[in-house]
Amino acid sequence: MPGKCVFNLLPPHAIDKGIALEQLMQLCGASGAIYIGDDVTDEAVFQRKLNNVLTIRVGRDSTSAAEFFVNHRLHVFEVLDKLIDCLRGTSSQI
């Protein structure tokens, strides 16, 4: 499976990142998740369109199924800081 600057070798019938995320959430008892990715392999999560998973792609791609985009990986820190502020009640906007 091609990826971003990698080639992933997977056994037949291997699970993708979307299935892995759902299983991890179930094991942890998480009711939701934020998933941020920049690789073609992350599309497996983006394409699932789960109501309880916020999906963010690093780097705009018109073919991506992600809900939101940030232009650069350093912008991820800004998004996380704003989310933390909202959770703490110190900000009213994202």
Image (cartoon, helix red, strand yellow):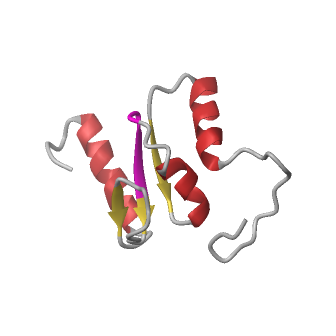
Q: Position of residue 74 (x, y in %)?
A: 41, 69
Residue ID at (24%, 41%): 86
Q: Position of residue 90 (x, y in %)?
A: 19, 41
The quadrant in which residue 52 appears is top left
Residue ID at (57%, 51%): 44
Q: Position of residue 72 (x, y in %)?
A: 40, 73
Toward the bottom, the furthest residue is 5
Location of the N terminus by quadrant is bottom right
The foreground one among 13 and 56 is 13
Taking the image as shown, residue 14 lies to the left or right of residue 34, namely right
Toward the top, the furthest residue is 29
Magenta residue check for 39: no
Q: Position of residue 64 (x, y in %)?
A: 44, 63
Residue ID at (80%, 45%): 13
Toward the left, the furthest residue is 92
Tell me if residue 92 comes above or below residue 67 in the rendering: above
Magenta residue check for 53: yes
Residue ID at (17%, 44%): 91
Taking the image as shown, residue 52 lies to the left or right of residue 38, namely left
The foreground one among 48 and 32 is 48
Kindly report the secondary structure that dominates the magenta region of the rendered protein.
strand
* Number of residue marks: 0
Tell me if residue 44 comes above or below residue 73 in the rendering: above
Instruction: Tell me which segment is drawn in magenta.
Output: 51-56
